[in-house]
Amino acid sequence: MSNAELERNKAIALRFKKYQGTPQMPQVEKEVLAPHYNRMRGGNLHLANNARDEDMGHPGLYLRKAIPDRVDVIEKVIADGDRVGLLFRVTGTHTGTFFGIPPTGKRLDVYEVALIRIENGQMVEGWFMMDEIALLMQMGAKLPPRSDGRLVAPPLPEGGEDPDALLARLAARPAATERDRNRLLAVKACARPAGAPESDCAPEYRELRHGFHHLREHGRKNSLGELVLDEAIADQCCRVEVLMAEGDEVWMRFTVNGTHRGSLYGIAPTGRRVGISAVRILKFGGGKLRESWTFADELGLLLQLGRPELLLG
């Protein structure tokens, strides 16, 4: 795909984002959304699922009833083939009911990631994930209780490709460009539970955000030590769903799966199978990994373990 086509795809995704909640939105949606557009995952998946079939109050289209002054701050944009990735922060004031959470008047500033697929100048697929733990923490709220007392856990993911198989497939092609080589290094890191080997990292390598950021902060704040996920979910493995590269960055959407057989910050082993989504943004230079930023669905994990209160009080 030419650079002009990639830039066009970025412009389409950014136009969709810019006009959400504005008077121009209906016309823009007609132009940029394909008739068969598939919103695979909503940003507030768990809060929405928790409120389903309950009289909790809806935050409105693009959350505008709950956050009327919403402004999305774009931090990163990437395009590769027919896909566009956006990393942005949702900012605004919580002044309306948000999936059962009454207005708090609190200022919000939380991360969300979007992975969008575009065909023939229109969006055909959208996948979104917001940091719902951070959102609830900033509101000072818990997950609203359902009338039936149930916790609605996400289903186990079934898609994606084994990273070793993907690595073999990529290695079979000539690594003609630096982007090709960066893709190989990114998948190689995903194939190892401990992450990228030290030999693939630059001396100044920085992990800007851990995937299980809030769990780590919980452990440090409560003097519980570092998060050792390999002990709590010893058989964990990942499957790669989306792999994108542009410039010196590689974006990867993947799932982390396994069995909860060890204590996790006081959650006794449940023997349950867990599987959650994560997005990792890797920055390379000179054939070495220099930075990583990872965002995992921590609320989804806690719901699967039946313990969302661990982080939400």
Image (cartoon, rainbow, N blue to C red):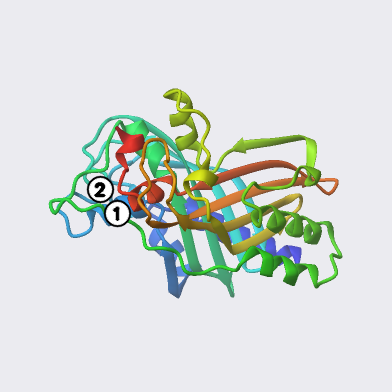
- The residue where tag 1 is placed is 48
Query: SS of the residue at dot 1?
Result: helix
Label 2 crowd bin: few (<14), some (14–19), many (20+), radius 10 Å:
many
From the top left corner, tell me how far across and down residue 256 is, in percent.
52, 56
When the figure is inspected, residue 95 is found, relative to residue 281, above or below; the finding is above
From the top left corner, tell me how far across and down residue 134 is, in percent.
41, 37
Residue 37 in the figure: left or right of residue 84: left
When the figure is inspected, residue 224 is found, relative to residue 288, above or below; the finding is above
* Circle 1: residue type: Ala
Q: Earlier in the sequence, mark 2 or mark 1?
A: 1
Q: Nearer the viewer, residue 212 or 105?
A: 212
Residue 32 in the figure: left or right of residue 92: right
Write the residue at 80% across / 58% down: 181
When the figure is inspected, residue 77 is found, relative to residue 75, above or below; the finding is below
Position of the C terminus by quadrant: top left
- The residue where tag 2 is placed is 99
From the top left corner, tell me how far across and down residue 65 is, in percent.
28, 46
Marks 1 and 2: in contact by CB < 8 Å? yes
Using the rendered view, name the quadrant where residue 204 is placed: top right
Query: SS of the residue at dot 2?
Result: loop
* Circle 2: residue type: Phe
